C-alpha cells in the first residue's frame, strides 16, 4: 500500500479519533505509538479479514469480533494450567542438562559456545544502547509480519495484504489460529534466515571451520535480537496475545522460546542428534520423578483431610 493511498483514506471518523489514547512512552516511541494506533484503526474499518499487528502498544485491534465468553476464558486458563507442569519439567531438564554439560563436559570451553555467547551479548549490548533503534525496530516488525504470513501459508490460508514499518505493521488473512497469532513471538525470524543461508551456501561451497564459528555467532546475535525485542514488545498490550487469552499466550510463548533455545544449544553441541536424544531421555526421566513426587504429595494431602475430625 502506497503512502498516497494511506493519506487519502484518512477519513475524520469520530469513532476512530475517540479510540486513540494518550501514549505513555516518551520521545520517539510515543509518536510511533500514536501514529500506529490511528493508522491501524482506519485500516481495520476498511478490511474484512483478520489483522495481526506487530506495533508498539496498539490496543482494541479486534473491535469487529465478539468477546470470548466465560466458558472460553475458563478453557484457556485450564489449558494454560495443564501446560505449566510441562514447562516446569522442560525448564528443569534444560537447567540440569546445561549445568551438567557446562561443569562436567566442558561445554562452556567449546568455541561454538563462546561464539554463540559473544554474538548474543554484543546484540544485547547494542539493544540496550539504543543505537540505531529505528532500524532495529523496522527489522523486527518486518520479521514479525513475514513470520505471520509464512505460517498463514503453512496452514493453507491466503495473505490478502501485508504492511510493515517503524510506525507499525499488519497482515490481513482469511485464516487464523493460535500458531499463526503467536508464531513471531517464539520463532526467531532472522535466525531462520541465517540457517537457510548457511544451508544454501554449504550445498555449493565447503564452509571453513572459521565460517562455522561465525555462523554460531550470527545465530547467537539473531536469537538475542529476537528475545530482546519480544520481551520489549509483550508488555505493550499486543493484540496477538489477547486473541487467545493473555495467560495462555504467555505460557505458549515461554514454552516455544524454551524449545527454540534447547534446539539451538543442541545444534551447537559436537553431536547435535545425540544431544537432542539425550535431552529427550532426560526429559522423560525428570517427568517421571516430578510426577511421582506430585502423586505422593496428593496422596498425603488426601490422607490428612480424611484423618481430620
Image: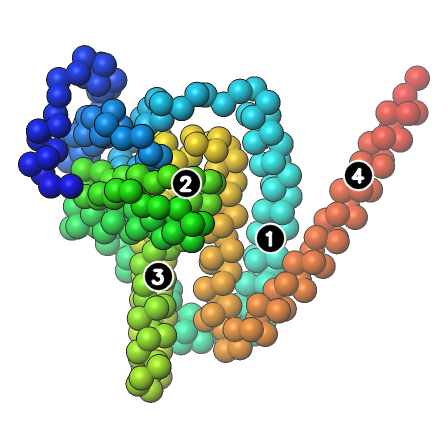
Q: Position of residue 209 (x, y in %)?
A: 35, 84
Q: Position of residue 106 (x, y in %)?
A: 52, 74
Alpha-carbon neighbours of circle 4 within 10 Å: few (<14), some, or many (≥20)? Answer: few
Q: In the rendered image of this protein, does residue 284 appear above or below residue 40?
A: below
Q: Secondary structure at mark 3?
A: helix
Name the residue that disc number 1 marks: 90
- Earlier in the chain: of badge 3 and badge 1, it is 1
Name the residue that disc number 4 marks: 297
- Report the front residue among 182 and 287: 182
Q: Nearer the viewer, mark 3 or mark 2?
A: 2
Residue 128 visible in the displayed image: no
Alpha-carbon neighbours of circle 1 within 10 Å: few (<14), some, or many (≥20)? Answer: many
For image coordinates 9% across by 38% down, the residue present is 3
Checking the image for residue 248, the label placed there is none
Q: CA distance from mark 4 to mark 2?
A: 44 Å
- Report the front residue among 289 and 230: 230
The figure's colour scheme reads rainbow
- Asked if labels 1 and 3 touch by Cβ distance under 8 angstroms, the answer is no
For image coordinates 63% across by 68% down, the residue present is 278
- Earlier in the chain: of badge 3 and badge 4, it is 3
Q: Position of residue 60 (x, y in %)?
A: 33, 24
For image coordinates 26% across by 35% down, the residue present is 56
- Earlier in the chain: of badge 3 and badge 2, it is 2
- On the rendered structure, is 45 left or right of 278? left
- Earlier in the chain: of badge 2 and badge 1, it is 1
Q: Secondary structure at mark 1?
A: helix
Q: Secondary structure at mark 2?
A: loop
Q: In the rendered image of this protein, does residue 62 appear above or below residue 292?
A: above
Name the residue that disc number 3 marks: 191
Amino acid at each position: 500500500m502506497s503512502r498516497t493511498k494511506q493519506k487519502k483514506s484518512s477519513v475524520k471518523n469520530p469513532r476512530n479519533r475517540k479510540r486513540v489514547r494518550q501514549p505513555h512512552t516518551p520521545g520517539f516511541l510515543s509518536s510511533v505509538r500514536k501514529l500506529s494506533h490511528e493508522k491501524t484503526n482506519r485500516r481495520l474499518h476498511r478490511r474484512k479479514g483478520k489483522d495481526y499487528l506487530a506495533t508498539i502498544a496498539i490496543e482494541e485491534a479486534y473491535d469487529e469480533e465478539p468477546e470470548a465468553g466465560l466458558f472460553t476464558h475458563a478453557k484457556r486458563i485450564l489449558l494454560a494450567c495443564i501446560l505449566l507442569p510441562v514447562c516446569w519439567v522442560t525448564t528443569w531438564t534444560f537447567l540440569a542438562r546445561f549445568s551438567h554439560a557446562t561443569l562436567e563436559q566442558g561445554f562452556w570451553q567449546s568455541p561454538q559456545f563462546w561464539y554463540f555467547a559473544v554474538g548474543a551479548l554484543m546484540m544485547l549490548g547494542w539493544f540496550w544502547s539504543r543505537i540505531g533503534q529505528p532500524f532495529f525496530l523496522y527489522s523486527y516488525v518486518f520479521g514479525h509480519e513475514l513470520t505471520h504470513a509464512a505460517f498463514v501459508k503453512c496452514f493453507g490460508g491466503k495473505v490478502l495484504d501485508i504492511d510493515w514499518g517503524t510506525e507499525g505493521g499488519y497482515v490481513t488473512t482469511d485464516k487464523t489460529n493460535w500458531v499463526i497469532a503467536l508464531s513471531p513471538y517464539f520463532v526467531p525470524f532472522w535466525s531462520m534466515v541465517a540457517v537457510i543461508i548457511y544451508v544454501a551456501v554449504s550445498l555449493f561451497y565447503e564452509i571453513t571451520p572459521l565460517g562455522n564459528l561465525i555462523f554460531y555467532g550470527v545465530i547467537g546475535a539473531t536469537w538475542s535480537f529476537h528475545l530482546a525485542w519480544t520481551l520489549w514488545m509483550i508488555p505493550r498490550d499486543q493484540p496477538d496475545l489477547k486473541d487467545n487469552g493473555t495467560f495462555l499466550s504467555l505460557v505458549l510463548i515461554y514454552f516455544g522460546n524454551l524449545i527454540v533455545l534447547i534446539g539451538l544449544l543442541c545444534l551447537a553441541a559436537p553431536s547435535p542428534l545425540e544431544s537432542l536424544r539425550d535431552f529427550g531421555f532426560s526429559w522423560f526421566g525428570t517427568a517421571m520423578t516430578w510426577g511421582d513426587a506430585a502423586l505422593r504429595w496428593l496422596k498425603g494431602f488426601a490422607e490428612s483431610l480424611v484423618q481430620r475430625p
